[in-house]
Image (cartoon, rainbow, N blue to C red):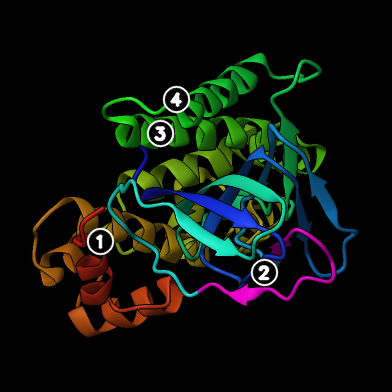
């Protein structure tokens, strides 16, 4: 199961509206019945019909409501929750809309090779769907909602996991993402840059310098720095700093090792310097990050 995927059922009756601030998490909405209007700044509103899915991979601020005249309420929920059968009910006494929402926590600073995806991707589970696997998952979700059975909460949680993965697949096929992936492939197919990335990934605790890396891959210091920045999207030591923090975040989530030990494992000589770097890239301290990850999910 994906880490920290949360799903929630929403039963809304017109007039209704939800206003979501930008969050460091991907968001997905599946309209089970009724209709919803998704609004993002600078874009035309998107009308979501039954079996339509909207995936917001960057957690962009948005409004979801039944009509442009409905006043949205600010959403102030947390980032983690345990699966629950409680359905969120909002709105008045008018037309009904049923929605399944899913949320997936994101790292604050993903590696640049992953690129910057579009704000929203919309796909459907109807007969015209270009992705039969996604359509089949949507059909399973709707069937479980229509006739709940024992352990439906857990079944829906797993289906939400699968639907998020399928949304990511569809996202990866978008032209903007394919262009960025192509750039990443160019970087990985360039022997000196591939070798430098491999060195940093394999020996994250090593005190790398640009000169050291350049020497190891057979380039001059200036030539290597320029080539790496052009192909990867940022300077070598900035990439290394982000990679170290990403690795540290995994260790904080998955082990009980002291912060000082993790700092050493990812190449920091002192805990204060590690704390500073971690907060710069993740937006919180290592201790707070670990405590948040230990909350029930």
In which quarter of the view is residue 154 placed? top left
In the displayed structure, 246 sits above or below 135; it is below
Which of the two discs, 2 and 4, labels the residue nearer the N terminus?
2
Q: Secondary structure at mark 1?
A: helix
Q: Which residue is mark 3?
A: 156
State the residue in front, 229 or 55. 55
Give me the residue at 39% from left, 28% from top: 148
Q: Which residue is mark 4?
A: 147
Q: Which residue is mark 2?
A: 61
Which of the two discs, 1 and 4, labels the residue nearer the N terminus?
4
- Please identify, in this view, whether the residue under mark 1 or under mark 2 is nearer the observer: 2
In which quarter of the view is residue 13 placed? bottom right
Q: Are marks 3 and 4 in contact (CB under 8 Å)?
A: no
Q: Which residue is mark 1?
A: 293
Q: Secondary structure at mark 4?
A: loop
The image shows residue 284 at horizontal and vertical percentages of 35, 78
Would you say 26 lies left or right of 270 here?
Answer: right
Badge 3: residue crowd in 10 Å (few <14, some 14–19, many ≥20): many
- Please identify, in this view, whether the residue under mark 3 or under mark 1 is nearer the observer: 3
């Amino acid at each position: 199961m994906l880490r920290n995927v949360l799903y929630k059922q929403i039963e809304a009756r017109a007039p209704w509206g939800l206003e979501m601030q930008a969050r460091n998490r991907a968001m997905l909405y599946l309209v089970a019945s009724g209709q919803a209007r998704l609004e993002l700044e600078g874009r035309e509103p998107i009308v979501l019909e039954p079996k339509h899915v909207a995936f917001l991979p960057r957690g962009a601020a948005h409004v979801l409501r039944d009509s442009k005249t409905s006043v949205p309420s600010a959403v102030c929920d947390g980032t983690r929750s345990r699966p629950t059968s409680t359905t969120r009910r909002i709105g008045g006494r008018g037309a009904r809309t049923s929605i399944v929402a899913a949320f997936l926590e994101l790292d604050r600073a993903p590696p640049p090779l992953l690129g910057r995806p579009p704000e929203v991707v919309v796909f459907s589970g109807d007969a015209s769907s270009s992705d039969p696997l996604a359509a089949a998952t949507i059909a399973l979700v709707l069937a479980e909602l229509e006739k709940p059975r024992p352990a439906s909460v857990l079944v829906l949680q797993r289906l939400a996991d699968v639907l998020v993965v399928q949304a990511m697949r569809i996202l990866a096929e978008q032209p903007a993402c394919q262009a960025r992936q192509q750039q990443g492939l160019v970087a990985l197919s360039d022997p000196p840059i591939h070798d430098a990335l491999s060195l940093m990934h394999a020996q994250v605790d090593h005190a790398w310098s640009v000169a050291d890396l350049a020497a190891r891959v057979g380039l001059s210091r200036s030539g290597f720095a320029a080539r790496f920045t052009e192909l990867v999207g940022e300077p070598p030591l900035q990439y290394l700093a982000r990679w170290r923090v990403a690795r540290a975040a995994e260790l904080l989530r998955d082990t009980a090792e002291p912060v000082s030990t993790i700092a050493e494992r990812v190449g920091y000589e002192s805990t204060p310097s590690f704390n500073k770097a971690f907060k710069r890239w993740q937006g919180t301290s290592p201790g707070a990050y670990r405590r948040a990850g230990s909350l029930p999910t």
